[in-house]
């Protein structure tokens, strides 16, 4: 017995513990719920009651929870939220989103301490909320808090953005006529929208972002779309039926359009019911909405709709097809000369609201048809009702001569094709027509499609494109090649060759007192343009012309450049000017020279330190003092391109300026390296018994690609194993080895256009005959030294130079003498 009592006691204790745990758990849950914090909060206190609305950061497309609570007064409260409003970004015009008579938006909650209301925001813009609290104290305290929330998300555009996008798509996909645009927007909206059977959503926001809405949503959304595309429209209300739709102005006439009633999937009858209410008259719309007659018959009604010209069933041909079905029955009445008669409607089994509208449209089509009775003109007026058509007819006296109407253009003339105007005889019973040809209009080239884009050194340009104002024909738009671009690089004291510079960018150095020793210049982007340049070099004076990337100056000789001349060549040389200026020691930046003028100094032993070169269209003004990052405004000599310290103004450039030059210099026993000779001048000695020990040969001013190659027969070594080219030394230096023979040849395009001739002065034999194009010149097996050499370029196939060329008399006609 005692054990049973203990067991019962344990059970009771266990049960009490469990109940306590449940109570504690509930308490903890409530505390946790009370302790939940929100990101945003608004409060308001009236008559001792503090009302609080809290919420977290809203996310478009997801429900936002609004936590409502109140303290003070009686702890029991009721809450509700009125219909929210919406406005587009940057707009103050608000739109009510839901029907405020809908129960969810007009009734208070049951009594509670807190309440959570949920609302989904779906469009970028601003939402406006009003929350009410009713504290059940005595007397009752009730008041409201307004909450305004702005939201933005690219995935949830504003209502206006959706409208703009739809209108842009409409304009791309239609002909641009009022009818086509209004119909396209009607279809677009009805494909996007479903009727809200809860009767809650009543806004364009609901229609365009939620896909739900009542007739209010259809009307408001369609109005926004029409207004955005420039089509006048007005709101029509049938207050007796609580229904609304749009009046739309197409081609100057008002039409009634009910998108709501067109949004149907029913296909019970012989027509597309999705367009039954597109483009009705007031009379026909009143068949569907009987109280509309009370509106359109009142004084001051602004959108009177009487035309069916832009009715959908008329425009798509259904009305004409239905009218044609009555032709024989009507004609039988006319042949009997009846003046009033009725014909039963074929669709009288349809609901009267359907057949009445359809027969009104069919009557319009019947009135557009041509009717006759013998030779009499017939004036027929048909009206339709739900069950029959009523006709009133008049017959005009007979006519025997053609009476042509004003004519109708049955084929419009285009810019390139002729048109046709058709005239019809209006005499009774006459169906004869005649036509006349309308001339083609020709293109009216007044539309600017795109402006001319000027070319630059980096980009091609394009000529202006103009188009016909009546069709898509265009002219112009030819590509304009890039402007010629000049590229150049300088060899600088202790630095060597710098990177290539372009179009006026400075080459050389500034503030480092470094001499320029050589330069290379090239033209880009212009195949019919070349560039020549020559420099005045320390010790040597003016050097022969170089051409298109060749080196002009010296390397490894520590010789300063003192002046430069640059000029353009080629078929397009007249289309451009080349401008250049230099930075000269002691003088700073000089003025701009152009087209072969000297730039630099003469007779003053002043080094060039920097240079700018730019090619501009012919006739362009000289570049400014401050150009391409170089500001020469502080230079006293900025207006002078050339400072001449000599008494002579003449400048003689050695060699040719219109054909290639061959340049060469020799290393002579006892004398060392001689200065450069060119084009047949004698390099070396004769009569002094001094051997040649080395030779350099190069080309300048070449208009063709290719090189000059050469090799020598050297005392003790024989023929060099490889060919030297383009200024490299052949022979020896510091070894006292004589040259005994030489071979010289051209490569590339140069070899196709020129022959290279050369002859030597050989010990004991004197001047030998002219060798060419790689032949040997000199001696072999005699151990005789070469003492002098002449080298000359001759056009391909031309005669060899004379035996006494340059005043050097040939002593032996052989070119090469071997033992």
Image (cartoon, rainbow, N blue to C red):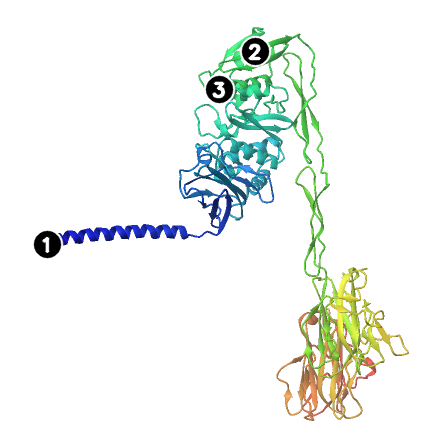
Q: Nearer the viewer, mark 1 or mark 3?
A: 1
Residue, x 49% and y 27% (percent of image)?
261
CA separation, marks 2 and 1?
112 Å
Is mark 1 in CB contact (under 8 Å) with mark 3?
Answer: no
Q: Is residue 711 shown left or right of residue 276?
A: right
Residue 315 appears in the picture as rendered: no
- Residue placed most toward the observer, 318 or 243: 243
Secondary structure of residue under mark 2: strand
- Residue placed most toward the observer, 230 or 326: 230
Residue on which disc 1 sits: 2
At which x and y percent is residue 379? 62, 12
Residue on which disc 3 sits: 353
At which x and y percent is residue 620? 80, 60
Query: Upstream in the sequence, badge 1 or badge 3?
Result: 1
Residue, x 70% and y 12% (percent of image)?
401
Q: Quadrant of residue 674?
A: bottom right
Residue, x 78% and y 73% (percent of image)?
582
Residue 429 appears in the picture as rendered: yes
Query: Upstream in the sequence, badge 3 or badge 2?
Result: 3
- Indicate which disc residue 461 carries: none
The quarter of the picture where the C terminus appears is bottom right
Q: Residues within 10 Å of mark 1 (few under 14, many from 20)?
A: few
Secondary structure of residue under mark 1: helix
CA separation, marks 1 and 3?
91 Å
Vertical order, 452 against 738 (above or below) = above
Residue on which disc 2 sits: 391
């Amino acid at each position: 017995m005692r054990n049973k009592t203990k067991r019962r006691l344990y059970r009771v204790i266990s049960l009490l513990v469990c109940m306590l745990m449940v109570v504690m758990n509930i308490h903890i849950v409530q505390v946790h719920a009370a302790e939940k914090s929100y990101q945003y909060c608004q409060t308001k206190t009236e008559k001792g009651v503090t009302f609080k609305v809290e919420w977290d950061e809203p996310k478009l497309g997801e429900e936002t929870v609004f936590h409502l609570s109140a303290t003070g007064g009686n702890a029991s409260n009721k809450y509700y939220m009125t219909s929210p409003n919406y406005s587009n970004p940057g707009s103050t015009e608000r739109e009510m989103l839901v029907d405020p008579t809908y129960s969810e938006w007009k009734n208070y909650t049951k009594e509670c301490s807190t309440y959570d209301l949920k609302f989904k925001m779906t469009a970028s813009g601003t939402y406006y909320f009003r929350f009410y609290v009713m504290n059940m104290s005595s007397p009752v305290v009730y008041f409201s808090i307004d909450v305004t929330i702005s939201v933005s998300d690219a995935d949830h555009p504003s209502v206006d953005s959706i409208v703009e996008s739809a209108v842009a798509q409409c304009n791309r996909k239609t002909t641009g006529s009022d009818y086509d645009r209004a119909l396209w927007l009607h279809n677009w909206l009805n494909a996007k929208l479903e009727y809200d059977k809860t009767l809650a959503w009543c806004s364009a926001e609901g229609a365009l972002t939620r896909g739900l809405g009542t007739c209010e949503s259809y009307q408001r959304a369609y109005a926004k779309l029409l207004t955005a595309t420039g089509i006048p429209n007005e709101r029509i209300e049938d207050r007796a039926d609580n229904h609304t739709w749009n009046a739309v102005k197409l081609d100057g006439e008002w039409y009634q359009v009910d998108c709501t009633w067109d949004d149907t999937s029913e296909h019970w009858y012989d027509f597309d019911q999705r367009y039954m209410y597109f483009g009705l008259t007031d009379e026909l719309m009143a068949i569907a909405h009987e109280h509309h007659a009370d509106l359109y018959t009142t004084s001051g009604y602004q959108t009177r709709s009487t035309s069916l010209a832009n009715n959908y069933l008329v425009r798509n041909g259904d009305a004409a097809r239905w009218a044609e079905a009555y032709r024989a029955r009507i004609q039988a009445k006319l042949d009997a000369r009846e003046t009033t008669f009725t014909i039963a409607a074929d669709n009288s089994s349809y609901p009267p609201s359907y057949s009445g509208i359809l027969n009104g449209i069919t009557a319009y089509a019947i009135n557009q048809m041509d009717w006759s009775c013998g030779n009499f003109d017939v004036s027929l007026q048909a009206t339709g009702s739900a069950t029959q058509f009523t006709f009133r007819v008049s017959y005009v006296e007979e006519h025997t001569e053609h009476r042509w109407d004003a004519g109708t253009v049955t084929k419009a003339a285009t810019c390139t094709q002729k048109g046709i105007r058709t005239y019809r005889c209006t005499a009774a019973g006459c169906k004869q027509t005649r036509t006349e040809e309308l001339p083609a209009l020709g293109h009216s080239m007044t539309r600017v499609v795109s402006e001319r884009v000027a070319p630059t050194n980096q980009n091609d340009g394009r000529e202006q494109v103009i188009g016909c104002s009546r069709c898509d024909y265009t002219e112009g738009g030819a590509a304009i090649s890039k402007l010629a671009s000049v590229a150049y690089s300088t060899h600088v004291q202790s630095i060597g060759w710098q990177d290539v510079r372009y179009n006026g960018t400075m080459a050389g150095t500034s503030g480092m007192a470094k001499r320029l020793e050589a330069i290379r210049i090239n033209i880009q982007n212009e195949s019919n343009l070349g560039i020549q340049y020559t420099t005045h070099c320390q010790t040597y004076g003016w050097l022969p012309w170089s051409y298109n990337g060749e080196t002009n100056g010296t390397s490894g000789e520590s010789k300063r450049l003192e002046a430069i001349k640059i000029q353009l060549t080629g078929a397009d040389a007249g289309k451009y000017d080349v401008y250049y200026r230099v930075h000269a020691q002691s003088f700073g930046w000089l003025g701009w020279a152009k087209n072969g003028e000297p730039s630099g100094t003469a007779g003053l032993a002043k080094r060039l330190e920097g240079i700018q070169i730019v090619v501009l269209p012919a006739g362009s003004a000289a570049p400014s003092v401050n150009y391409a990052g170089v500001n020469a405004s502080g230079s006293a000599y900025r207006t002078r391109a050339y400072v001449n310290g000599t008494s002579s103004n003449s400048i003689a450039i050695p060699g040719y300026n219109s054909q290639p030059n061959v340049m060469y210099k020799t290393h002579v026993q006892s004398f060392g390296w001689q200065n450069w000779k060119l084009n047949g001048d004698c390099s070396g000695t004769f009569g002094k018994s001094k051997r040649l020990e080395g030779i350099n040969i190069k080309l300048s001013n070449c208009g063709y690609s290719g090189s000059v190659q050469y090799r020598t027969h050297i005392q003790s070594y024989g023929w060099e194993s490889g060919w030297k080219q383009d200024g490299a030394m052949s022979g020896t230096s510091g070894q006292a080895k004589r040259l005994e023979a030489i071979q010289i040849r051209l490569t590339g395009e140069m070899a196709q256009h020129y022959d290279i001739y050369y002859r030597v002065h050989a010990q004991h034999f004197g001047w030998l005959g002219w060798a060419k194009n790689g032949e040997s010149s000199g001696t072999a097996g005699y151990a005789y030294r070469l003492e002098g050499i002449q080298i000359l370029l001759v056009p391909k196939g031309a005669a060899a130079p004379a035996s006494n060329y340059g005043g050097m008399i040939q002593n032996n006609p052989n070119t090469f003498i071997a033992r």
